[in-house]
Every structure is written in structure tokens, then in C-alpha cells.
Amino acid sequence: MGPTSWRHGLATFVCVLLSACASTPQPPVEALPLTGPLQGWSLRPLPGKAQTRYVLSSREGRACVQATSEGSASLLRRMLDLPSGQIARIEFDWWIDAGPVVPSGEQPPDDAAARIVLGFEGDEARLSVKDRLMFELARTITGESPPYASLIYAWDARQVHDVTLISERSDRLRKIVVAGGEQPPGRWLHLSRDLGADFRQAYGEVPGRLVGLALMTDSDNTSSHAQACYGDVRFYDAQGQLLQGSLLMSAPALSAP
């Protein structure tokens, strides 16, 4: 299915992924122990937003990262450096406890119980003038280069499965709805995707190096509650070998808070 537009709630999301907005101080949230399977990860707040709470937890005896949003939005992310041609597929597990609540009759804003966000390098000379200016602004303000392109796998009960959506704010943000209405909350869901094929579907080109991975649960636009638990996020090569940079929640299961 061809790409369509996201209609609501992406301004802050774009700011974070492109690192183009200065952060506004927010009340502190409980710190997640960024050790063990989360070594190398960091919490990334969004400007002007309350922060989603990320804690270690478990579902049915399986360790996971529980993300709880109370009208909030932020990411848990890590930097990577993987040749995309080496990645044959990505596999990930999530458990949806509750999705954002959209008032009856309103256009669904861009909130999601669960997202896997991937950032890629690429040839910036191919970007639009608008995007090149945004990238230069981001580097000037933060000293950090934004991803050339971001591909997002999302759980969304309101959208058609496998639809590709393009942000109205920047065409460097594209998501594929991989689960939702047909996958009810309260169970583990395992997903396996051909990363190269999905990127080509979304962008019409071959992906560059994979430079970032993030988890994101938010409900700031609906001012509602959303909660999910993220299990493993695994990258495999064509021979089925696990690649460095995978998130392995293989530590002994922890009791839910």
C-alpha cells in the first residue's frame, strides 16, 4: 500500500529524531538502570513533554522493558553502526497492556502504545532544501547529525496492517503499522520483518548504515494512558547469525512493579 500522511502530533517527535530542538527541563522520572542488556542505552526526553517511564519488568516470566505513558512522550535509545546490507531481518517482541484512548468522533492523533524506531545514514545531497536546512540547524544547535532517514515499526489499532505513513513535518520520518486491531492487548507478539524490503517500501531506495535504535511509547496528544513491554530486538544476517547491537532481555525475569 502506498505511503499516506500522518495528520497529527509529530512536531515534537520530529524535533527529537532530528535533534533539532532545545530541551525544556522536565520533572525527573525514576531512572532506569542502564546496565546489563541496556548498557549503552540512554533516556531521551522530548521538549516540553512529560517523560514516559521506562522500567525493567516481566510478562509471563519473560524479562522486558515496561514503558508507561501518562499523557507523556520520550524515548529510550542507543547508537549503532551496522551495514544495512548485513542485516537480513529484524525480529522483536512486545506486549501491549493498553493503547492510547482517542475520544469518539475525533481524528486519531499520532500516539502509539509501542514503536521500534530505526535511524539510517544516507546521501544528504538527495534531501529537499527544507530537510537540508533542518539538518544544518540540528547540527548547529546540538552538534549531533540527525539520521538521514528513520523507519518506524508501530502498533496502531486504528490503521490498516502494513500501511506506510509519511510525516507531514518531514519525509525523513516514515512508519509501517505492523500490528494493531487484529492483535489484542495482553499477550506476547513476535514480529519478524525484512528490514531492507521494508525500507525500500517506505523510501524507494536501499538503506544506508543503521546508526540508531529506539523504543517509544507515548500518549501526549490524547492525554491518556498507554503501556507496553518490550522484549528482545534482534538483528540477523542472511546466515541466521545474531548481529551486534541487538537488545537481548535474557536476564532472569524480574517482578512487575
Image: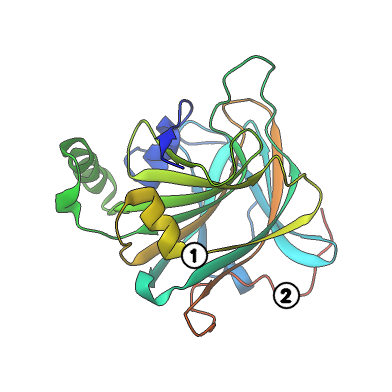
Give residue 63's quadrant in the image: bottom right
Looking at the rendered image, the disc whose residue lies closer to the viewer, 1 or 2, is 1
Instruction: Please say if 219 is above or below 108.
Output: below
Instruction: Please say if 99 is above or below 199.
Output: above
> Is residue 155 at least partly visible in the picture?
yes
Residue nearest the observer in this picture, 27 or 88: 88
Q: Is residue 203 left or right of residue 114?
A: left
Residue 54's tag is none
Q: Amino acid at mark 2?
A: Ala
Give residue 51's quadrant in the image: top right
Q: Does the CB distance between marks 1 and 2 fall below 8 Å?
A: no
Residue 11: image location, x then y, percent? 41, 31
Residue nearest the observer in this picture, 153 or 247: 153
Instruction: Please say if 180 is above or below 244.
Output: above
Residue 251's tag is 2
User: Residue at label 1?
Assistant: 194
Query: Which residue is found at the position 54% from the left and 80% from the top?
Result: 242
Task: Say which element carries label 1.
Answer: loop
Q: Earlier in the sequence, mark 1 or mark 2?
A: 1
Q: Is residue 124 left or right of residue 152?
A: left
Residue 203: image location, x then y, percent? 34, 50
Direction front: furthest residue: 1
> Is residue 23 at least partly visible in the picture?
no
Q: Is residue 137 left or right of residue 45?
A: left
Query: Which residue is found at the position 40% from the left and 56% from the top?
Result: 199
Q: Amino acid at mark 1?
A: Asp
Q: CA distance from mark 1 to mark 2?
A: 27 Å
Give residue 85's quadrant in the image: bottom left
Query: Which residue is found at the position 65% from the left and 14% from the top?
Result: 105
Q: Residues within 10 Å of mark 2 (few under 14, many from 20)?
A: few
Query: Which residue is found at the position 50% from the left and 47% from the top?
Result: 176
